[in-house]
Image (cartoon, rainbow, N blue to C red):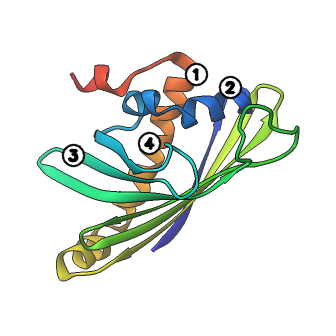
């Protein structure tokens, strides 16, 4: 399954990149995140592997995330007009996914976030869920982007809405 989702954020690209790259902010916008713990490497850098755990109701998903691309490597001074790329693969029981995020300037104070997502499912249950609810995975990706937008623009924390 492959799909693309995108969103415009009324925050300059440099600030969006800074917020996305900081692991301390992840629980504020990544709904359902229980744990994101580097196993090797430095958070967000190419080659780093992390243990990730998500909880949604009674469903728990645990997997391993590997950062496959971060461009430019130094996010402090990004040349004007250059896209920023964050890419990762996640492997969990019955699932493999690749996410390719691209952040570009949509205006002087606006960022366009385009996310290309690919999922492969193995096992009868995961394939059945993917077949019966293909829109659910796409909807969840878009929800994460909308939650990040609310966090970046207004400081909203998804944990406050859940509690």
Which residue is labeled 2 in the image? 11
- Report crowding for label 4: few under 14, some 14 to 19, many 20 or more residues within 10 A (C-alpha): some
Circle 4 is placed at which residue position? 144
Q: CA distance from mark 4 to mark 3?
A: 13 Å
Mark 4: secondary structure: helix
Q: Residue shown at 23%/77% (left/top)?
A: 128
Q: Earlier in the sequence, mark 1 or mark 3?
A: 3
Q: Position of residue 123 (x, y in %)?
A: 22, 81
Q: Secondary structure at mark 3?
A: strand
Taking the spot 83% from the left edge, 27% from the top edge, the residue there is: 108
Whichever of callouts 2 and 3 sits on the residue coming sooner in the sequence is: 2
| Residue found at the far left of this picture | 58
In the rendering, which numbered label is found on residue 79?
none
Separation of residues labelled 4 and 1 (CA atoms)? 14 Å
Left or right of 35: which side holds 82?
right
Residue occupied by mark 1: 153
The residue that appears at 32% across and 50% down in the rendered structure is: 52
N-terminal of the pair, mark 1 or mark 2, is 2
Residue tagged 3: 56
124 relative position to 37: left or right: left
* Mark 1 crowd level (few <14, some 14–19, many ≥20, 10 Å Cα): few
């Amino acid at each position: 399954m492959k799909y693309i989702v995108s969103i415009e954020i009324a925050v300059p690209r440099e600030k969006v990149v800074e917020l996305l790259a900081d692991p301390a902010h992840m629980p504020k916008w990544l709904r359902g995140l229980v744990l994101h713990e580097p196993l090797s490497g430095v958070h967000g850098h190419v080659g780093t592997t992390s243990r990730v755990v998500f909880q949604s109701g009674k469903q728990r998903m645990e997997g391993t995330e590997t950062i496959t691309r971060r461009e430019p490597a130094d996010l402090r001074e990004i040349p004007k007009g250059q896209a920023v790329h964050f890419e990762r693969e996640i492997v969990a029981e019955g699932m493999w996914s690749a996410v390719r995020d691209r952040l570009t300037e949509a205006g002087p104070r606006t960022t366009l976030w385009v996310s290309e997502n690919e999922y492969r499912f193995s096992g009868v249950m995961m394939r059945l869920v993917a077949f019966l609810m293909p829109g659910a995975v796409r909807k969840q990706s878009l929800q994460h982007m909308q939650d990040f937008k609310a966090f970046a623009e207004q400081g909203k924390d998804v944990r406050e809405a859940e509690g």
